[in-house]
Image (cartoon, grey):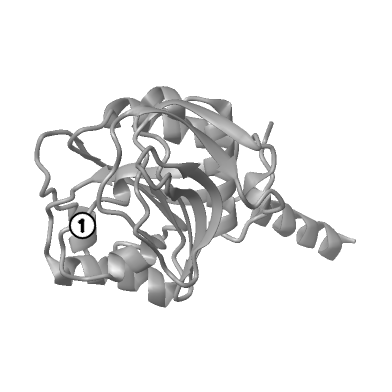
Amino acid sequence: MRTLILLLALSISAVAEPLHALYITGGCCHEFTAQKKTLTEGIAARTDIVWTIEDKGETDDKTIRFTTFDKPDWNKGIDVVVYNMCSGKFTNVDYIEKIAAVHRKTGLPAVVIHCAIHTFREAKTDEWRKLLGVTSMRHEKQQPFDVRVVAPDNPIMQGFPAVFHDPMDEQYVTIKLWPNCIPLAQATGHDKEKSKNTVVWANTYGKARVFGTTIGHLNKVMETPEYLDMVTRGLLWACKKPIELKH
């Protein structure tokens, strides 16, 4: 009986252990201060998670280097990385490829949000784009658009509206989907071709699962329960955890 109680206690302890997440944020052109609060608190309200944060603040600098990645063991004790930053003109290939390699080789999960997709876009390497699962080099002007779910049976999209009206956002133009990227939701561009842009997806990069979305230029979009539920589900999927929210 004492052995059974001990085993049950260990099992409960393992279930109760929170995820340890690294949140990378800061850069130009976005409401990163407000979004840090919205995302970290919103996700924590939906799943058990502890945050470590590198925040470079809101700045006009488009060449930010995040010093977390200068440490050789930066991923030690980290279960998932959430990237919500903007550093489009940082072009150090060695630095970028070393970050990507940690995910590819160790299976460290990632969540990539909005301008993380345009981060490092001028660098002469595709490894960051392979990690993301999509390539995008530009976005349309801020305007409303509808997000349409294209994979309704995917557990990440459970509870998300079949059509979500994004009241004001930047629609990122999809140039390429990498081979292991699975589109989950799309939006129609406002160009002549009415191009279909992937705005929510799931990707596999080496051993790592990656959830991504380009939705979320404005904090008021991130604050919606539909958005926070979706991102939390994507994070849990990336971590290979049961996709169950607290509420």
* Residue 155 image position (x, y, % from top left): 68, 51
State which quadrant residue 205 falls in: bottom left
| Residue 18 in sight | no
Of residues 155 and 73, the one drawn nearer to the viewer in this rendering: 155
Going by the picture, which residue comes out furthest to the front? 192
Q: Residue at point 40% right, 41% down?
A: 189
Of residues 215 and 70, the one drawn nearer to the viewer in this rendering: 215
Of residues 149 and 208, the one drawn nearer to the viewer in this rendering: 149
Q: Residue at point 39% right, 48% down?
A: 193
- Residue type at the position of mark 1: Phe
* Residue 141 image position (x, y, % from top left): 28, 32
| Residue 207 in sight | yes
Q: Secondary structure at mark 1?
A: loop
Quarter containing the N terminus = bottom right
Crowd around label 1: few <14 · some 14–19 · many ≥20 (10 Å): many
- Note whether 67 is above or below 145 in the view shown: below
Q: Which residue is mark 1?
A: 120
Q: Residue at point 83% right, 65% down?
A: 3
